[in-house]
Amino acid sequence: MKKILVFFMLMTCMKAHAGKIVWQWSVPVGKSGDSQSRAWLWIPPDCKAVKAVIFAQQNMEEQSILENPKFRKEMGKLGIAEVWVSPGYDLVFDFSKGSGDLFSEIMSNLSMVSGYQELSFVPFIGLGHSWAASAPYAMAAWSPERALACISVSGQWPYIWGAFAPDIWGDRNIDFIPSIVTMGEYEGALNFANEGLRQRSANQFLPLSMLTGPAQGHFNAAQEKIDFLSFYIKKVLHFRLPKHSAAGKQPKLIPIDPTKTGWLAERWMGDYNVSSPAAPVDDYTGNKQEAFWYFDQETVRMVEKYQARHKGKKHQLIGFTQDDKFAEQRSTHQQFDLVFNPLPDGVTFKLQAKFYDTVPGGSPRPANWTGLAAGSHVGHVQGVKTISIDPIAGPVKKINDSIFSVHPQLGYPLLPRSYEAWFVATDLGDRFYRPAVQQAKMNIPVRNLKGRVQNIIFKPLVELTNPKSFVLKAVSDAGLPVGFYVLEGPAVIVDGILKLCKVPPSAKFPVKITVVAYQYGSNSEPFVQTAEEVKQVYWLQNNR
């Protein structure tokens, strides 16, 4: 029996590893129908007192936004914490069925384990993508006095109900609460704006904004979009938080009356120029029923610059390839259903993409995006390889530009939906071509069930006390290498080394660090079953 020993050393988390994502605390979502739902908390490492919290349940882009390093840097400056629930316990936040009570329970539990008691009452910003995009409005309708803003990504408009948004409104409203919807050109932004404009006209006290992403799609957590959301949140705090509030109490938020303050700007019109200049609400000379509301001139200028990109450029199309040929396009949400075909190690797999020279069939979207019939010639960027493939969601990690690996991680328990890996292929375009974006889905087996059974022995450690170093021993009785991830706690794993990160200054000690050992097995000869994950808990003491 071959034993694999993995060595770790406990070290201070340095800036060089800022790309490794930390969630310092987590709690189970106790009343969820899915017992594996957990709520993770990130507190900015220098934050003494939290001013507000962003709350999101995982559907697709939520994780990409909340874990984005630049986004977190900006949230740190603002004193904003993040709470991320995965798997989501109620993506539409139906408070008529107890979702609001469960939210309160989550925040109370996180306040107790972290030491940041204000989490139980600070204002929140609801954020949701696609299926979860109505949840921010439901949160605000449930607790308007605590709702700072609503962020609906690739989203939905308020006061709309259906499969993704139950009719929970009654006589409730979200007047005076700023709300923004982002929508990409390649997900129908031009027509989608019509309903938003109708709602803004019908609800005069709703400060409703829209950000259109030229050449962006439904699964496109682009850095420039995330940067704008950071900017928007900064404006929210500036206009809504009072300068002074009593310590230990929920602040009284400043209402935003869009009939008296802010600016109006005409909707995005694609390659066409707007007909009326943006102006303060009282001075706007255009058709107000064709304009969205924004905080101020600076916000309008940011939106105008964002939405003016790529005007007049040609469209290009990307397709995923497997076995050196284009995978089949289908008329589904994902368009591509990729096959999990691992390399001999059983965990890595190859994935590539390239440009189309003709508009493909199978899905109507490529024809709609380009305005060309299927089979028509379509051009693209020439020269060096410019397409990048990145995971959107799921237990995978990128090894290089074409190799990916199954990588169990926090937020993705051993459930079929959690093991739906989503990818996005993007090209940034050039002076002639718009950027291109294409999504795909790959179903990965939750477990390998064929072959020999394997077990992991993961030796426990004593309490962690900075600056001690430790050797962790993980043994697979199948002789396969054991992987690790941090389930919770202020630590990251880099090249087999466990590194402690800075603990926020008001944290409650000891701080729990949970490390999980895993071995996925192999679905090729010799077949090996997936091992049961093994957890070890360590307690970090206060040595300040």
Image (tube, helix red, strand yellow):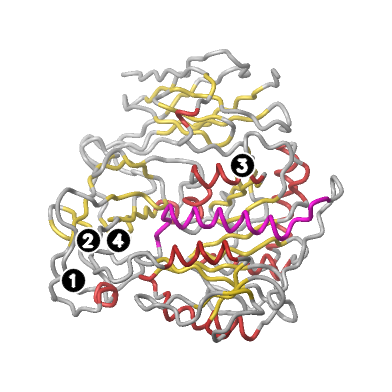
Label 2 – label 3 distance at C-alpha: 38 Å
Mark nearest the camera among 4 and 1 is 4
Q: Mark 2 and mark 1 in contact? Answer it, CB < 8 Å.
A: yes
Mark carried by residue 153: none
Mark carried by residue 435: 4
Note whether residue 157 is visible.
Answer: no
Q: Which residue is mark 2?
A: 319
Q: Which residue is mark 3?
A: 76
Q: Mark 1 and mark 3 in contact? Answer it, CB < 8 Å.
A: no
Label 4 – label 1 distance at C-alpha: 18 Å
Earlier along the polypeptide chain: callout 4 or callout 1? Answer: 1
Q: Sort mark 4 into few (<14), some (14-19) or many (20+) by Cα contacts within 10 Å.
A: many
Residue 91 shown left or right of residue 170 in the figure: left
Earlier along the polypeptide chain: callout 3 or callout 4? Answer: 3
- Residue type, numbered disc 1: Pro
Residue 10 shown left or right of residue 78 in the figure: left
Q: Which residue is mark 1?
A: 360
289 and 404: which one is in front? 289
What element does badge 4 sit on?
A: loop
Mark nearest the camera among 2 and 3 is 3
Q: Sort mark 1 into few (<14), some (14-19) or many (20+) by Cα contacts within 10 Å.
A: many
- Residue type, numbered disc 4: Pro
Mark nearest the camera among 1 and 3 is 3
